[in-house]
Amino acid sequence: MKLLSVNIGQPQPLNHAGRSYRSGIHKLPVAGPVPLRAAGLLGDGQADRKAHGGPHRAVYCYGRENYDFWAERLGREDYRFGLFGENLTTLGLTEDEIRIGDILGIGGAQIQVSQPRVPCYKLADKLGIPGFEKTFLAANRPGFYARVLVPGAVTAGEAIKLLQRDPAGITVAEINAALHLDKDRHIAQRAARIKALSPEWRRAFEKLAGKS
């Protein structure tokens, strides 16, 4: 497993199809080492703190494998790392293998997988594909957010180590599908008990599990 790119960006005013908003989705690769703190990467920022950022979503990770998938599916070759708004572009951390609660070591930092990413219209606007957020969600390749357990510097090119595997055994892909795709109440019951899952997602699973 490897860290391919570290990407940061500050919120900026955007306008697309007559819709105006602020967003930090435009990330650019930076040379390291870059300090990774409890609040996220130094120099990075979020405009909508209800949907991004905070201690449980301090850093967003997206895999090179997904870049290859989208390049083939959409017939585009103009991709550069950071395009999907991720802070860390990774290799070898696929959603069907990485579990909620897994602890990863990157350089001097340690992070813990906390939840999948929920796409919105801002991703579709950035890629110039109307409705892409729905296509992105249906593909079940959301990437994942992580909290920072141990602050430290991270540098593109260094290895990512799996330090601890969560015993609950629910992958990012399974969690995402259970809440947004197939509404799996069996997984919902298990997910609601995962302490490492972000509070917002735990509450959603508690509600889903409680439905008759």
Image (spheres, rainbow, N blue to C red):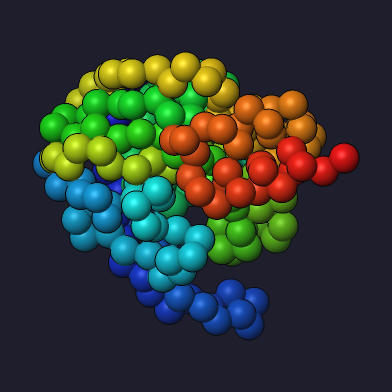
Tally the numbered discs.
Answer: 0
Report the residue that reaches farthest toward the right: 212
Image-based side of 7 in relation to 18, left or right: left
Regarding residue 13, the answer to whether it shows in the image is yes
Q: Is residue 41 above or below residue 176?
A: below
Image-based side of 201 in relation to 28, left or right: right
- The residue shown at (41%, 70%) is 47
Image-based side of 165 in relation to 182, left or right: left
142 vs 13, nearest the viewer:
142
Q: Position of residue 201 (x, y in %)?
A: 58, 46
- The residue shown at (76%, 31%) is 184
- The residue shown at (49%, 24%) is 99
Regarding residue 180, the answer to whether it shows in the image is no
Q: Is residue 22 above or below residue 188?
A: below
163 vs 190, nearest the viewer:
190
Q: Position of residue 209 (x, y in %)?
A: 74, 38
Q: Position of residue 34 (x, y in %)?
A: 15, 46
Q: Is residue 47 above or below residue 77?
A: below
Q: Position of residue 33 (x, y in %)?
A: 12, 41
- The residue shown at (82%, 43%) is 211
Q: Quadrant of the N terminus?
A: top left
Q: Quadrant of the C terminus?
A: top right
Image-based side of 57 in relation to 125, left or right: left
18 vs 48, nearest the viewer:
48
